Image (cartoon, helix red, strand yellow):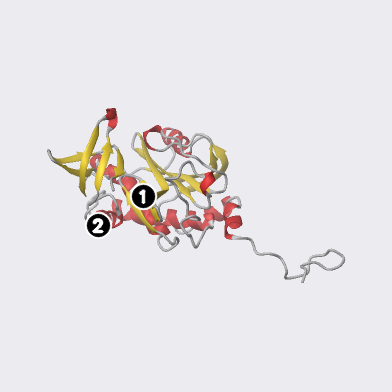
């Protein structure tokens, strides 16, 4: 039967339910996001949703220098100058993903322990997405969230931590309903392509920010603020990390290359790589998992 009467009117009850992708592509409701994120939060102080900006990280870094309080969250439907690690660009298709940044001021955490923040964020993102994709989800040191799809592991989300004085801004770019042509390369994927059961960006954003809050407060609120071992963060990271235990090639700053077996992560969040010349600690580098 047709869904309309002879007069062309819609028959009650015959409206087509929106597809998960259509739900995902709806613009975020700033009011609904604030209600979901701020209610009962011990970390977040404000949430702003904008249609377009250059970079949420750059905006919050500027706000941090101007004295913005910790717990500020900025979400953009589209970024025109999004950045990843090593000054790479981050592609942002409107409505197809989530791009947001959080301003933190971990005053009680020793500077040597702050390298754990991007790793903590990865743990939080992976935990929030657990069970929402048909593919396994894991982490690549230091700041990639991967989905294990047929043909290999693909990048689902990227994390960028930047510092301004005592403030650290954590940026996250997560591919939600992006199709392969909308992604920057075949090495990237999305929750849609990974068989995601939930593509509602509003719900996913609230879940990720909630998970980040729980891990952050646990990390800074213990007897030893910033201690990854006593907070349980180190154990959680090693469980989720797909880099440790793998043969890797690390492209270091300055064009140098380090090869070996990733064997651990130290107290500062550095990757430990076992090489013929001994164990090397890597604080920054582009890691390639060697098959």
Position of the N terminus by quadrant: bottom right
Query: Residue 15: x percent and y percent?
Result: 71, 65
Residue at 33% across, 37% down: 166
Residue 64 numbered tag: none
Q: Which residue is mark 1?
A: 121
Residue 240 visible in the picture? yes
- Most extreme residue toward the left is 277
Q: Residue at x 24, y 57 (%)?
A: 235
Location of mark 2 (residue) = 235
Label 1's element?
A: helix
Q: Classify residue 84 by image quadrant.
A: top left
Question: Residue 38: percent from the left, percent from the top?
Answer: 48, 54
Q: CA distance from mark 1 to mark 2?
A: 14 Å
Q: 276 or 15: nearer the eye? A: 276
| Element class at badge 2 | helix
Callout 1 environment at 10 Å: few (<14), some (14 to 19), or many (20+)?
A: many
Residue closest to the eye, 44 or 76: 76
């Amino acid at each position: 039967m047709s869904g309309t009467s002879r007069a062309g009117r819609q028959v009650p009850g015959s409206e087509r339910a929106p597809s998960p992708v259509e739900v995902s592509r709806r613009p975020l409701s700033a009011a609904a996001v604030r209600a979901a994120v701020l209610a009962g939060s011990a970390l977040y102080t404000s949430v702003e949703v904008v249609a377009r900006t250059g970079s949420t990280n750059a905006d919050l870094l500027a706000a941090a220098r101007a004295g913005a309080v910790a717990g500020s969250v900025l979400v953009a439907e589209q970024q025109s100058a999004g950045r990843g690690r090593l000054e790479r660009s981050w592609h942002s298709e409107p409505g197809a993903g989530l791009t947001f940044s959080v301003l933190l001021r971990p005053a009680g955490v020793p500077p040597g322990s702050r390298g754990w923040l991007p790793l903590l964020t990865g743990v939080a993102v992976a935990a929030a997405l657990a069970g929402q994709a048909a593919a396994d989800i894991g982490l690549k040191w230091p700041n990639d969230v991967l989905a294990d799809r047929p043909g290999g592991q693909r990048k689902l989300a990227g994390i960028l931590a930047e510092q301004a004085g005592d403030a650290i801004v954590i940026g996250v770019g997560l591919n939600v309903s992006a199709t392969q042509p909308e992604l920057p390369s075949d090495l990237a994927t999305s929750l849609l392509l990974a068989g995601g059961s939930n593509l509602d960006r509003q719900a996913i954003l609230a879940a990720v920010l909630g998970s980040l809050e729980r891990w952050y407060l646990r990390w800074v609120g213990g007897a030893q603020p910033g201690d990854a071992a006593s907070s349980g963060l180190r154990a959680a990271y090693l469980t989720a990390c797909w880099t440790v235990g793998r043969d890797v090639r690390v492209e270091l700053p300055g064009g140098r290359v380090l090869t070996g077996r990733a064997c651990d992560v130290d107290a500062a969040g550095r990757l430990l790589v076992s090489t013929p010349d001994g164990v090397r600690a890597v604080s920054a580098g582009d890691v390639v998992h060697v098959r």
